Structure formats: structure tokens, C-alpha cells
Image: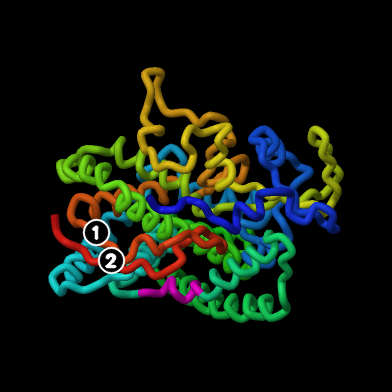
Amino acid sequence: MRSTVVRQLLEVHGADPRPESPGRRLLVIEPDDVGEILHSTAFQRTDFVRQLAGSGLLATDGPLWRERRRIMQPSFPVREPERHLESIDWAMPGFIDRLGCAVDEDRRLCLLDEMMRVISRIVYRAVFGVELRSDEDRVSKFQPMMDAVGAVHWSLVAPGGTVSAAALSQLQRTRSLADEEIAWIIQRRRGADVGVDDALGRLLSAQAEGRIDDEGIHDEVRSLVLAATETSANSLVWCLLLLEDHPEVIERIAPELAAGRGEAELDAVIWETLRLYPPVWANERQAVETAVQGDRTWEPGDRAVISAYRLHRDPRLWNDPDLFRPERFAASSEGRWKPPHRFAYMPFGAGPHLCIGRNLALLEMRRILREIISGFRVEFESPGEIEPILGIVMRPSAPVSVRLRRR
């Protein structure tokens, strides 16, 4: 069975990181405390996140966050979970053709690269109103920035870790490269003869009304790319790796999916993957005023480390927490599945800052997995050597090389 233990993360969470230093980073392990912090006005997003993403949805609080959310929320309607299905349907033929060509040529694929390509095509079209060719790989222009962000993020939460001047300089250089791609996206969207139903269209419309400036639009595009591409792509890879470890699951659901059924079973697989490998494994909230929580007093500058990974594997909350058991997400006789605690399961965050694009992420994961599982057999090369490593997201430690066979 694949190891599901991330050694570095367990080291971080074995005790409070840096408990005596100024601006302490303290681990929060009680779900009740997590909920209290996420809803408290005494805690805000950290200054570090603002350095990475600018003043976008990922990094802001208060009136600015509410205004930006009001601008973009209509393009991610909560009550229309299939709003972006048309963009996903548009991207699928090119994706399936690429997989089919690899089969016909008996050619290896980098699975993560293919997931990033199809996810970016969906996101660019659904969120930014920009169409990419099936062989176009533009989101890779953000990859150096994502890697640099991940390195700095880990240095901040690791015991005894420090952020070097070289790492910060690398972050600034890679962010400048990413900003060139953001400018290209905005230029393409300004020239597109489409409506304003995508998020970028609404941002540009808001700019015409004087509600946001150029810098604000750049910040929001950067935030949306960070939140919407690498997270879903890595989750798809983890899902297929888990199914590789559990062939009985894939053999059970593949015929159902091919017949147009099996939605509940596929959703259970996705939810269990997100439990074991939450894309955003940890985030922080920074105290902006003194706050008392049980026997712990938070002073301004203290940072609460909230780890979805830690909560999702807490044996007090989950039976066999390190095992892949999709059936735990099956509906009961009492109705829909419910988590053991409101804040025990948070793959898309929780509280007021719940991920704006969660419905899009789930919809694209369902469709992509259905196409792969029902149409192809995935043969991994050296799957046992692949372990999770920690960056801005939880990602595979090595290139995930596969060969595909048609079912």
C-alpha cells in the first residue's frame, strides 16, 4: 500500500511550531477552535499571502474582499453547480484526442502535465473568457512562481525554517514572469466579443464603473490562477494513483461510468481523495488583536496554522484515517453524508472564505475522471516511488509517467 504519511508535515505538527518566537506560529488541532478562528474578526489573512497574490480574493479581508467577491460571485453561482459545463464539454474532445494519440503511438505521458493542460483550457475559457488550443500550454508560465511560492511557504511553517533573501528574490522574479502572462490574458479578454458572465469579464465591466483598477484586476487573475489550476490538476493525479493502489474500486466503477451511471460512486472516490490529499494542505490566519481561546491567548502578530491534512487524518474524527475508503462518503439511510464535525473536512476551505470556484473544480474533476476511467486503463511507471511533497499545494514527488490502454 502506498505510504500516506508525509514525514515533514508530521514533524511540523508534532508540536506547536516555534512556540516562543515573536509572531508565533501555533498549530490549531481542535475543529471547534478552527471554526472560531475562521469566523473571528480578530484574525485575518496573513501579510505573507498578500505578498504572494496581491490584494486578491486569496489574500484580503473586510470591505475590499466583500466588494471583489460581489463582483465575481455571479460568475460562480452557488445554485447553478453546472454553470461551467459548456466550457468543460468544449475542452474534452481535444483532451480525449491527445490521450488517444498517446495510445496509438504507444507513447508515455506525464500525467500531471496533461491534467494541467486540460484544466488550464477549462479555466482560461470558463473564468477568463479566453480559448486555448488543445496543444497549447500557457499555464506553465505560472509554474516557476508556484514553485517559488511553495518553497517560501514551507520555509515559513517548518520548525527552525527561515526564508532566505535568495528565495524572496526568486519569488519576485517568477512573479514578474507570471505577470506577463496575466497581461496577455487581460489583453486577449479585452478583445473578445463575448458577454460578461466569466469572472474576468465582470472585473473589466467593474473597472469601467470605477470599482476596480488595473492592479486590482491583475491581483484577481493571479489569485484565480493560483487557486484553480494546480489544485485540481494535482487532485486528479492523486485520485488516479489511489485507484492504482485499489484496482478493485476502479474495476467496480468503470463499467458503471461507461454506461452513463456511477455518479455517486465517482463522487465518493473524489471526496475521499480530497480527504487524504487536500490540495491546500495548510493555511494560516494572523491575529490582528488580542484574542483568548480556551487556555490559549493570541497576541497581535501570532499566526494560527490550520491544516486540512491534519484535520482530515485525525483518528479522533475518522475511522482508519490513513486508509482509502470511498464508502465512508456514501449516503446513509438518514440522507446525505455528513462530516464527523463541521470543520473536520475542508478541502475547499471553510468559513466566509470558502473557495469561490469549488463547483467548477468538482465538475471538471468528475468529467475528466469519467472520461479516463471509462475509456482507458492507466499503467503507471514506478508508482511506488511517488510520494507527496509539500509546496503551495500537496504534489507528487516525481514526474508521474504513465502509458494508456483503451478499455
Q: CA distance from mark 1 to mark 2?
A: 7 Å
Q: Label 2: few (<14), some or many (≥20) within 10 Å?
A: some
Magenta-colored stretch includes residue 127: no
Left or right: 243 with respect to 29? left
The residue at which mark 1 appears reads as: 378
| Above/below status of 346 relative to 119 | above
Image-quadrant location for residue 198: bottom left
Position of residue 48 measured from the top left corner of the image (x, y, whole percent): 70, 63
Query: Who's the residue at 37% across and 38% down the image?
Result: 326
Left or right: 104 with respect to 176? left
Q: Which mark is residue 402?
A: 2
The answer to the question of whether label 1 and label 2 lie on touching residues, with beta carbons closer than 8 A, is yes
Q: Which mark is residue 78?
A: none
What amino acid does circle 2 point to? Val
> The magenta stretch spans which residues?
137-143
Query: Who's the residue at 68% across and 59% down the image?
Result: 157
323 or 36, nearer to the observer: 323
